[in-house]
Image (tube, helix red, strand yellow):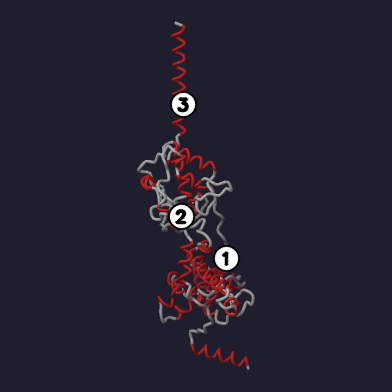
Amino acid sequence: MVRSFTFLLCLSVISLANAHAAEEGQADAVSIDDVRGIFEANCLSCHNETDLKGGLSLQSTEHLRRGGDSGEVIAAGAPELSYLLDLIEPDDEGHSEMPKGADPLQPAEIDLIRRWIADGATWPDNVELQASTWWAFRPLKRPAVPEVTSETPDAFPIRNPIDAFIADKHREHGLLSSPAADRRTLIRRLYSDLWGLPPTPEAIEEFVSDAHPLAYERLVDRLLQSPHYGERWARHWLDVVKYADTCGYDKDKLRPHAWPYRDYVIRSFNADKPYARFVQEQIAGDVIFPGTPDGILGLGFVAAGPWDFIGHVEVPESKFDGKVARHLDRDEMVTNTMNTFCSVTIQCAQCHDHKFDPFTQEHYYGLQAVFAAVDRSERPFDLDPQIERQRQELKDRLQL
């Protein structure tokens, strides 16, 4: 009786231990969901279906089984035979072959991949990894306008879709609107925004005493129709493109023919020129709009940035310093174009693939090749040839 009880007790303990071990092993099993974040963040930018570096893609289990140019990279159930671990594990000096040009994976990440391989490298056929979605490069979408009442609890009137978005966020975060600005405040804001100048006391009193229901709209129209509007807002654009009336660098020589581009920008703002046309004229106006003055003047953008006069004029390109100056000039054109029109720091890809944006060195130097044949020079140009001749006559007389 005692022996039977002892046997049954031991059998129960063994069964419970085996069941617990099985449950623990099952709970600790590593799946593709546990390691996909590591692959997507560190591997898929170079190893995907469209960019097969080394002939390898880690986008799906089908591609993983094929391996790469060096053969299979994973031996399911055998981490010690898996080439992938050889690539990602740091050497004695802390360097790893992969990820290429980046810091090695963290020890915890490497251990997770090792355990995933040891557990059989399970990866269902219907699971496909995706590289970074690059939210900044997604196509723009028109969001649905929130449904809000015509007037919010704090008496904020909904006059347009922008008001609806603001009111919706106010409601979400429990915020209240600021009180409506009085007319003296409104006219100061308008003048500051559109002209960059304060209104005169007379202009303030005229607006305050204007009883017309469209007094505000009429003031906006009047300020927009003034040449001062273009002069004010062109400054923002000229700052973006690094425009200056001098070359910069050591001698900072005067650019006597830079001003037509400046005036072109001012005139474009005052004419409310469509942005697409504004961009096209500055990148390839002579090709897209041949024979038009703005198609020529807009190209001043390409030469708007700093220019090393010494490196280009006084140092021959055959010398090392001349080659450096030429490279920096091409880089300035590429950088200015991409910074201005795409808001991306392409210049980071001169020496290595971009760390944060989807640009490689190949992309960068491909863009630089577009500007390789561009040379800067002083070129007189005026919309009215007669004025240009008169200006030249005055310069000649001053030199006598």
What is the x, y in percent for residue 240? 54, 68
Cα–Cα gap, marks 1 and 3: 72 Å
Asked if labels 3 and 1 touch by Cβ distance under 8 angstroms, the answer is no
Could you classify mark 1 by the number of other residues whose Cα lies within 10 Å: few (under 14), some (14-19), or many (20 or more)? some
- Residue occupied by mark 3: 21
Dot placed on the residue nearer the N-terminal end, 1 or 2: 2
> The disc labelled 1 sits on which kind of residue?
Arg
What is the x, y in percent for residue 226? 52, 75
Mark seen at residue 134: 2
Please identify the quadrant where the C terminus is shown: bottom right
Relative to residue 380, is residue 274 drawn left or right?
Answer: left
Identity of the residue drawn at 45% across and 69% down = 275
> The disc labelled 3 sits on which kind of residue?
Ala
Q: Identify the element where label 1 is drawn.
A: helix
Viewer-side residue, 124 vs 266: 124
Q: Identify the element where label 3 is drawn.
A: helix
